[in-house]
Image (cartoon, rainbow, N blue to C red):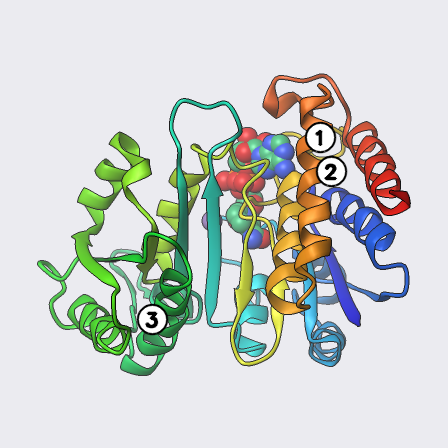
Amino acid sequence: MKLCVIGGDGIGPEVVDAALAALLVLLPQLEVHHAEAGWQTFVKQGVALPQETLERARECGAVLFGAAGSPAYKVAGYRSPIVELRRSLACYANIRPTTSPMGSARAVDLVVVRENTEDLYIGEEASDGEVATALRRISRAASRRVGEVACALAASRPRRKLTIVHKANILPLSDGLFRDSVREVAAGYAGLEVEEVLVDTAAYRLAANPAAFDVLVAPNLYGDILSDLAAAFGGGLGVAPSLSVGEGCAIAEPVHGSAPDIAGRGIANPQAALSSVALLLDRVWQQPALARRLQAALADTLASGVRTPDLGGQSTSAEFTRALCARLQASSAA
Ligand code: NAD
Ligand code: MN
Protein backbone atom coordinates (compact mmCIF):
# COMPACT_ATOMS: atom_id res chain seq x y z
CA MET A 1 0.00 0.00 0.00
CA LYS A 2 1.25 3.45 -0.95
CA LEU A 3 0.20 6.91 0.16
CA CYS A 4 1.20 10.27 -1.27
CA VAL A 5 1.10 12.88 1.50
CA ILE A 6 0.65 16.52 0.53
CA GLY A 7 0.51 18.90 3.49
CA GLY A 8 0.00 22.10 1.52
CA ASP A 9 -0.41 25.43 3.30
CA GLY A 10 -1.34 26.77 6.73
CA ILE A 11 -2.64 24.05 9.05
CA GLY A 12 -2.49 21.52 6.19
CA PRO A 13 0.95 20.13 7.13
CA GLU A 14 0.01 20.17 10.84
CA VAL A 15 -3.10 18.03 10.39
CA VAL A 16 -1.63 15.60 7.85
CA ASP A 17 1.38 14.93 10.08
CA ALA A 18 -1.01 13.99 12.89
CA ALA A 19 -3.12 11.79 10.62
CA LEU A 20 -0.03 10.10 9.23
CA ALA A 21 1.32 9.34 12.70
CA ALA A 22 -1.93 7.57 13.58
CA LEU A 23 -2.08 5.78 10.26
CA LEU A 24 1.43 4.41 10.71
CA VAL A 25 0.40 2.86 14.03
CA LEU A 26 -2.35 1.00 12.15
CA LEU A 27 -0.34 0.23 9.02
CA PRO A 28 3.37 0.21 9.88
CA GLN A 29 4.21 -1.28 6.47
CA LEU A 30 2.63 1.64 4.57
CA GLU A 31 4.90 3.16 1.92
CA VAL A 32 4.75 6.95 2.35
CA HIS A 33 5.79 9.50 -0.27
CA HIS A 34 5.78 13.20 0.61
CA ALA A 35 5.04 15.74 -2.10
CA GLU A 36 4.48 19.46 -2.40
CA ALA A 37 1.57 21.61 -3.58
CA GLY A 38 -0.13 24.85 -2.66
CA TRP A 39 0.37 28.56 -2.53
CA GLN A 40 3.83 28.33 -0.92
CA THR A 41 4.86 25.93 -3.66
CA PHE A 42 3.57 28.40 -6.25
CA VAL A 43 5.57 31.23 -4.66
CA LYS A 44 8.74 29.11 -4.73
CA GLN A 45 8.36 27.25 -8.02
CA GLY A 46 5.80 29.23 -10.04
CA VAL A 47 3.44 26.26 -10.09
CA ALA A 48 0.94 25.21 -7.41
CA LEU A 49 0.77 21.55 -8.41
CA PRO A 50 4.18 20.46 -9.71
CA GLN A 51 4.28 17.68 -12.31
CA GLU A 52 6.39 15.63 -9.92
CA THR A 53 3.64 15.79 -7.26
CA LEU A 54 1.00 14.75 -9.76
CA GLU A 55 3.11 11.80 -10.90
CA ARG A 56 3.77 10.74 -7.32
CA ALA A 57 0.06 10.95 -6.53
CA ARG A 58 -0.85 8.88 -9.59
CA GLU A 59 1.74 6.27 -8.84
CA CYS A 60 0.53 5.91 -5.21
CA GLY A 61 -3.16 5.87 -6.15
CA ALA A 62 -4.05 7.29 -2.73
CA VAL A 63 -3.41 10.81 -1.50
CA LEU A 64 -3.70 12.47 1.88
CA PHE A 65 -4.14 16.19 1.19
CA GLY A 66 -4.07 18.87 3.92
CA ALA A 67 -5.18 22.21 2.53
CA ALA A 68 -4.18 24.82 0.01
CA GLY A 69 -4.38 28.52 0.70
CA SER A 70 -5.55 30.34 -2.40
CA PRO A 71 -5.43 34.11 -2.91
CA ALA A 72 -8.82 35.76 -3.32
CA TYR A 73 -7.53 37.86 -6.20
CA LYS A 74 -6.29 36.96 -9.65
CA VAL A 75 -2.69 35.78 -9.76
CA ALA A 76 -1.45 34.95 -13.25
CA GLY A 77 -0.65 31.28 -13.60
CA TYR A 78 -2.13 30.23 -10.24
CA ARG A 79 -4.77 27.51 -10.15
CA SER A 80 -6.03 25.78 -7.03
CA PRO A 81 -3.90 22.63 -6.72
CA ILE A 82 -6.64 20.57 -5.08
CA VAL A 83 -9.10 21.35 -7.87
CA GLU A 84 -6.39 20.37 -10.38
CA LEU A 85 -5.52 17.25 -8.45
CA ARG A 86 -9.14 16.05 -8.26
CA ARG A 87 -9.55 16.58 -11.98
CA SER A 88 -6.17 15.13 -12.98
CA LEU A 89 -6.74 11.98 -10.90
CA ALA A 90 -10.35 11.74 -12.14
CA CYS A 91 -11.59 11.88 -8.55
CA TYR A 92 -14.99 12.98 -9.73
CA ALA A 93 -17.06 12.50 -6.58
CA ASN A 94 -16.39 13.97 -3.16
CA ILE A 95 -18.02 12.13 -0.27
CA ARG A 96 -18.61 14.33 2.78
CA PRO A 97 -20.29 12.62 5.73
CA THR A 98 -21.63 14.41 8.79
CA THR A 99 -22.59 12.56 11.93
CA SER A 100 -23.71 14.36 15.06
CA PRO A 101 -21.34 13.93 17.99
CA MET A 102 -22.31 11.47 20.71
CA GLY A 103 -24.77 12.86 23.20
CA SER A 104 -26.12 15.61 20.95
CA ALA A 105 -29.85 16.29 20.81
CA ARG A 106 -30.18 15.81 17.06
CA ALA A 107 -29.35 12.50 15.40
CA VAL A 108 -27.81 13.77 12.19
CA ASP A 109 -26.32 11.17 9.86
CA LEU A 110 -26.04 12.51 6.34
CA VAL A 111 -23.61 12.52 3.43
CA VAL A 112 -23.14 15.26 0.88
CA VAL A 113 -21.87 13.87 -2.43
CA ARG A 114 -20.34 16.75 -4.32
CA GLU A 115 -19.55 16.73 -8.05
CA ASN A 116 -15.83 17.39 -8.20
CA THR A 117 -14.77 18.23 -11.75
CA GLU A 118 -16.94 20.90 -13.34
CA ASP A 119 -19.55 23.60 -12.58
CA LEU A 120 -17.87 26.98 -11.85
CA TYR A 121 -14.71 25.18 -10.74
CA ILE A 122 -13.49 24.91 -14.33
CA GLY A 123 -12.20 28.43 -13.57
CA GLU A 124 -13.03 29.91 -16.97
CA GLU A 125 -13.37 33.61 -16.17
CA ALA A 126 -13.05 36.78 -18.17
CA SER A 127 -13.21 40.44 -17.23
CA ASP A 128 -12.74 43.82 -18.90
CA GLY A 129 -12.65 45.48 -15.49
CA GLU A 130 -16.32 46.49 -15.68
CA VAL A 131 -18.05 43.25 -16.47
CA ALA A 132 -16.79 39.85 -15.42
CA THR A 133 -18.10 36.48 -16.46
CA ALA A 134 -17.51 32.97 -15.16
CA LEU A 135 -18.44 29.98 -17.25
CA ARG A 136 -20.42 27.26 -15.54
CA ARG A 137 -20.32 23.87 -17.22
CA ILE A 138 -22.56 20.92 -16.38
CA SER A 139 -22.36 17.75 -18.43
CA ARG A 140 -24.52 14.66 -18.58
CA ALA A 141 -21.49 12.41 -18.21
CA ALA A 142 -20.14 14.10 -15.08
CA SER A 143 -23.63 14.34 -13.56
CA ARG A 144 -24.29 10.67 -14.22
CA ARG A 145 -21.03 9.44 -12.74
CA VAL A 146 -21.42 11.44 -9.52
CA GLY A 147 -25.05 10.28 -9.51
CA GLU A 148 -23.81 6.66 -9.60
CA VAL A 149 -21.65 7.22 -6.53
CA ALA A 150 -24.51 8.92 -4.68
CA CYS A 151 -27.09 6.26 -5.62
CA ALA A 152 -24.79 3.37 -4.68
CA LEU A 153 -24.08 5.06 -1.36
CA ALA A 154 -27.76 5.75 -0.66
CA ALA A 155 -28.66 2.17 -1.58
CA SER A 156 -26.12 0.88 0.96
CA ARG A 157 -27.57 2.89 3.84
CA PRO A 158 -30.60 1.95 5.98
CA ARG A 159 -32.81 4.87 4.93
CA ARG A 160 -32.05 4.53 1.20
CA LYS A 161 -32.92 8.15 0.56
CA LEU A 162 -31.40 10.47 -2.04
CA THR A 163 -31.91 14.23 -2.28
CA ILE A 164 -30.95 15.86 -5.58
CA VAL A 165 -29.99 19.50 -5.06
CA HIS A 166 -30.31 21.96 -7.95
CA LYS A 167 -31.66 25.33 -9.06
CA ALA A 168 -33.44 24.27 -12.22
CA ASN A 169 -36.13 26.92 -11.77
CA ILE A 170 -33.51 29.54 -12.70
CA LEU A 171 -31.09 27.33 -14.64
CA PRO A 172 -33.32 24.80 -16.41
CA LEU A 173 -30.71 23.82 -18.97
CA SER A 174 -27.66 23.30 -16.74
CA ASP A 175 -29.20 22.41 -13.39
CA GLY A 176 -32.02 20.66 -15.23
CA LEU A 177 -29.42 18.47 -16.93
CA PHE A 178 -27.81 17.66 -13.59
CA ARG A 179 -31.16 16.74 -12.06
CA ASP A 180 -32.35 14.66 -15.00
CA SER A 181 -29.03 12.82 -15.32
CA VAL A 182 -29.03 11.84 -11.65
CA ARG A 183 -32.71 10.83 -11.91
CA GLU A 184 -31.89 8.56 -14.86
CA VAL A 185 -29.22 6.82 -12.83
CA ALA A 186 -31.48 6.60 -9.74
CA ALA A 187 -34.17 4.88 -11.82
CA GLY A 188 -31.83 1.90 -12.04
CA TYR A 189 -31.84 1.48 -8.27
CA ALA A 190 -34.90 -0.29 -6.88
CA GLY A 191 -36.19 0.85 -3.52
CA LEU A 192 -34.44 4.18 -3.48
CA GLU A 193 -36.50 7.13 -2.25
CA VAL A 194 -35.57 10.05 -4.49
CA GLU A 195 -36.52 13.65 -3.83
CA GLU A 196 -35.32 16.90 -5.36
CA VAL A 197 -34.90 20.18 -3.54
CA LEU A 198 -33.93 23.65 -4.78
CA VAL A 199 -30.57 24.65 -3.32
CA ASP A 200 -31.85 27.59 -1.27
CA THR A 201 -34.60 25.45 0.23
CA ALA A 202 -32.03 22.74 0.86
CA ALA A 203 -29.94 25.23 2.85
CA TYR A 204 -32.98 26.19 4.93
CA ARG A 205 -34.06 22.60 5.50
CA LEU A 206 -30.52 21.59 6.41
CA ALA A 207 -30.33 24.32 9.01
CA ALA A 208 -33.85 23.66 10.33
CA ASN A 209 -33.98 19.86 10.29
CA PRO A 210 -30.70 18.19 9.28
CA ALA A 211 -31.85 14.80 10.61
CA ALA A 212 -34.33 14.56 7.72
CA PHE A 213 -31.51 14.09 5.19
CA ASP A 214 -29.69 10.92 4.23
CA VAL A 215 -27.61 11.31 1.03
CA LEU A 216 -27.55 14.61 -0.87
CA VAL A 217 -26.04 14.94 -4.32
CA ALA A 218 -25.18 18.34 -5.74
CA PRO A 219 -23.19 20.15 -8.41
CA ASN A 220 -19.74 21.29 -7.29
CA LEU A 221 -20.43 24.74 -5.80
CA TYR A 222 -23.73 23.90 -4.06
CA GLY A 223 -22.06 20.79 -2.65
CA ASP A 224 -19.13 22.85 -1.36
CA ILE A 225 -21.41 25.32 0.42
CA LEU A 226 -23.93 22.82 1.79
CA SER A 227 -21.21 20.53 3.14
CA ASP A 228 -19.67 23.36 5.19
CA LEU A 229 -23.17 24.06 6.53
CA ALA A 230 -23.69 20.37 7.31
CA ALA A 231 -20.30 20.30 9.09
CA ALA A 232 -21.81 22.52 11.78
CA PHE A 233 -23.95 19.56 12.93
CA GLY A 234 -20.97 17.25 13.21
CA GLY A 235 -18.86 19.39 15.52
CA GLY A 236 -17.53 21.95 13.05
CA LEU A 237 -14.90 22.23 10.34
CA GLY A 238 -12.24 20.84 12.66
CA VAL A 239 -13.86 17.41 12.46
CA ALA A 240 -15.45 17.29 8.98
CA PRO A 241 -13.82 14.65 6.75
CA SER A 242 -14.05 13.92 3.05
CA LEU A 243 -12.92 11.42 0.46
CA SER A 244 -12.67 12.07 -3.25
CA VAL A 245 -13.12 8.99 -5.42
CA GLY A 246 -13.49 8.16 -9.08
CA GLU A 247 -11.56 6.06 -11.56
CA GLY A 248 -9.28 4.24 -9.15
CA CYS A 249 -7.41 7.02 -7.36
CA ALA A 250 -8.64 8.50 -4.08
CA ILE A 251 -7.89 11.64 -2.09
CA ALA A 252 -8.50 11.83 1.66
CA GLU A 253 -9.00 15.54 2.29
CA PRO A 254 -10.51 17.39 5.23
CA VAL A 255 -13.38 19.72 4.27
CA HIS A 256 -11.62 22.67 5.90
CA GLY A 257 -9.02 24.98 4.36
CA SER A 258 -5.64 26.27 5.48
CA ALA A 259 -7.12 28.21 8.46
CA PRO A 260 -4.61 31.09 8.39
CA ASP A 261 -6.15 32.46 11.62
CA ILE A 262 -4.77 29.53 13.65
CA ALA A 263 -1.91 28.25 11.45
CA GLY A 264 1.45 27.79 13.18
CA ARG A 265 -0.01 27.84 16.69
CA GLY A 266 -0.16 24.06 17.10
CA ILE A 267 -3.87 24.05 17.95
CA ALA A 268 -5.48 22.85 14.71
CA ASN A 269 -7.84 19.95 15.21
CA PRO A 270 -6.41 16.96 13.31
CA GLN A 271 -9.70 15.04 13.58
CA ALA A 272 -10.97 16.04 10.12
CA ALA A 273 -7.79 14.69 8.53
CA LEU A 274 -7.90 11.59 10.75
CA SER A 275 -11.51 10.81 9.84
CA SER A 276 -10.66 11.36 6.18
CA VAL A 277 -7.98 8.67 6.61
CA ALA A 278 -10.63 6.43 8.21
CA LEU A 279 -12.73 6.87 5.05
CA LEU A 280 -9.71 5.89 2.95
CA LEU A 281 -9.10 2.80 5.09
CA ASP A 282 -12.75 1.78 4.92
CA ARG A 283 -13.77 2.59 1.37
CA VAL A 284 -10.57 2.40 -0.66
CA TRP A 285 -8.14 0.10 1.11
CA GLN A 286 -10.89 -2.29 2.20
CA GLN A 287 -9.74 -2.21 5.83
CA PRO A 288 -13.02 -1.63 7.68
CA ALA A 289 -11.65 -3.13 10.91
CA LEU A 290 -8.76 -0.64 10.94
CA ALA A 291 -11.15 2.21 10.13
CA ARG A 292 -13.34 1.19 13.08
CA ARG A 293 -10.31 1.02 15.36
CA LEU A 294 -9.33 4.54 14.35
CA GLN A 295 -12.85 5.86 14.89
CA ALA A 296 -13.12 4.14 18.27
CA ALA A 297 -9.75 5.60 19.37
CA LEU A 298 -10.93 9.05 18.24
CA ALA A 299 -14.15 8.73 20.24
CA ASP A 300 -12.28 7.47 23.32
CA THR A 301 -9.75 10.30 23.14
CA LEU A 302 -12.54 12.89 22.99
CA ALA A 303 -14.46 11.18 25.77
CA SER A 304 -11.35 11.33 27.96
CA GLY A 305 -11.48 15.13 27.67
CA VAL A 306 -8.53 15.58 25.32
CA ARG A 307 -9.84 18.18 22.87
CA THR A 308 -8.46 21.01 20.79
CA PRO A 309 -9.75 24.58 21.42
CA ASP A 310 -12.28 24.52 18.52
CA LEU A 311 -14.16 21.86 20.53
CA GLY A 312 -13.88 23.83 23.76
CA GLY A 313 -10.77 22.00 25.02
CA GLN A 314 -7.26 23.10 25.87
CA SER A 315 -5.15 20.43 24.21
CA THR A 316 -2.70 21.13 21.44
CA SER A 317 -2.72 19.16 18.18
CA ALA A 318 0.36 17.27 19.40
CA GLU A 319 -1.25 16.36 22.75
CA PHE A 320 -4.36 15.15 20.97
CA THR A 321 -2.31 13.10 18.52
CA ARG A 322 -0.17 11.55 21.29
CA ALA A 323 -3.27 10.56 23.27
CA LEU A 324 -4.86 9.12 20.14
CA CYS A 325 -1.77 7.14 19.10
CA ALA A 326 -1.44 5.73 22.64
CA ARG A 327 -5.03 4.46 22.41
CA LEU A 328 -4.40 2.99 18.99
CA GLN A 329 -1.32 1.20 20.28
CA ALA A 330 -3.30 -0.14 23.25
CA SER A 331 -6.07 -1.39 20.95
CA SER A 332 -3.54 -3.22 18.77
CA ALA A 333 -2.06 -4.91 21.85
CA ALA A 334 -5.55 -5.98 22.97
P1 NAD B 1 -11.02 27.45 6.62
O1 NAD B 1 -11.74 26.16 6.52
O2 NAD B 1 -9.56 27.42 6.41
O3 NAD B 1 -11.29 28.09 8.08
C1 NAD B 1 -12.60 28.48 8.51
C2 NAD B 1 -12.63 28.57 10.04
O4 NAD B 1 -12.60 27.25 10.59
C3 NAD B 1 -11.43 29.31 10.62
O5 NAD B 1 -11.84 30.06 11.74
C4 NAD B 1 -10.51 28.18 11.07
O6 NAD B 1 -9.67 28.51 12.14
C5 NAD B 1 -11.49 27.09 11.45
N1 NAD B 1 -10.90 25.76 11.21
C6 NAD B 1 -10.74 25.16 10.01
N2 NAD B 1 -10.13 23.99 10.15
C7 NAD B 1 -9.86 23.83 11.47
C8 NAD B 1 -9.23 22.81 12.24
N3 NAD B 1 -8.74 21.70 11.67
N4 NAD B 1 -9.13 22.99 13.57
C9 NAD B 1 -9.62 24.09 14.16
N5 NAD B 1 -10.23 25.09 13.49
C10 NAD B 1 -10.35 24.96 12.15
O7 NAD B 1 -11.73 28.44 5.60
P2 NAD B 1 -11.28 29.93 5.17
O8 NAD B 1 -10.71 30.64 6.33
O9 NAD B 1 -12.48 30.46 4.50
O10 NAD B 1 -10.17 29.72 4.05
C11 NAD B 1 -8.77 29.83 4.31
C12 NAD B 1 -8.00 29.40 3.07
O11 NAD B 1 -8.20 28.02 2.82
C13 NAD B 1 -8.41 30.15 1.79
O12 NAD B 1 -7.23 30.48 1.08
C14 NAD B 1 -9.19 29.13 1.01
O13 NAD B 1 -9.06 29.28 -0.39
C15 NAD B 1 -8.54 27.84 1.45
N6 NAD B 1 -9.41 26.64 1.36
C16 NAD B 1 -8.81 25.51 0.91
C17 NAD B 1 -9.50 24.33 0.89
C18 NAD B 1 -8.78 23.10 0.42
O14 NAD B 1 -7.60 23.14 0.16
N7 NAD B 1 -9.45 21.96 0.30
C19 NAD B 1 -10.83 24.27 1.34
C20 NAD B 1 -11.40 25.46 1.83
C21 NAD B 1 -10.69 26.63 1.83
MN1 MN C 1 -15.12 24.21 0.83
Sequence-wise, which precedes: disc 1 or disc 3? Answer: 3
* Residue carrying label 2: 297
Query: Going by the picture, which residue comes out furthest to the front?
Result: 334
Q: Position of residue 214 (x, y in %)?
A: 34, 49
Given the image, on which type of amino acid does mark 2 rest?
Answer: Ala
Horizontal side of residue 161 vs 274, given as left or right: left
Which part of the image, by quadrant, shows the C terminus?
A: top right
Distance from the alpha carbon under mark 1 to that under mark 3: 35 Å
Query: Going by the picture, which residue comes out furthest to the left?
Result: 169
Q: Residue at x 29, y 68 (%)?
A: 136
The numbered mark at residue 147 is 3
Tell me where residue 32 sits by quadrant: bottom right
* Residue carrying label 1: 300
Q: Are marks 1 and 2 in contact (CB under 8 Å)?
A: yes
Horizontal side of residue 215 vs 94, given as left or right: left
Q: Position of residue 103 (x, y in %)?
A: 50, 23
Given the image, on which type of amino acid does mark 3 rest?
Answer: Gly
Q: Is residue 42 visible?
A: no
As displayed, is residue 296 above or below residue 140? above
Mark 2 nearby-residue class (10 Å; few <14, some 14–19, many ≥20): many
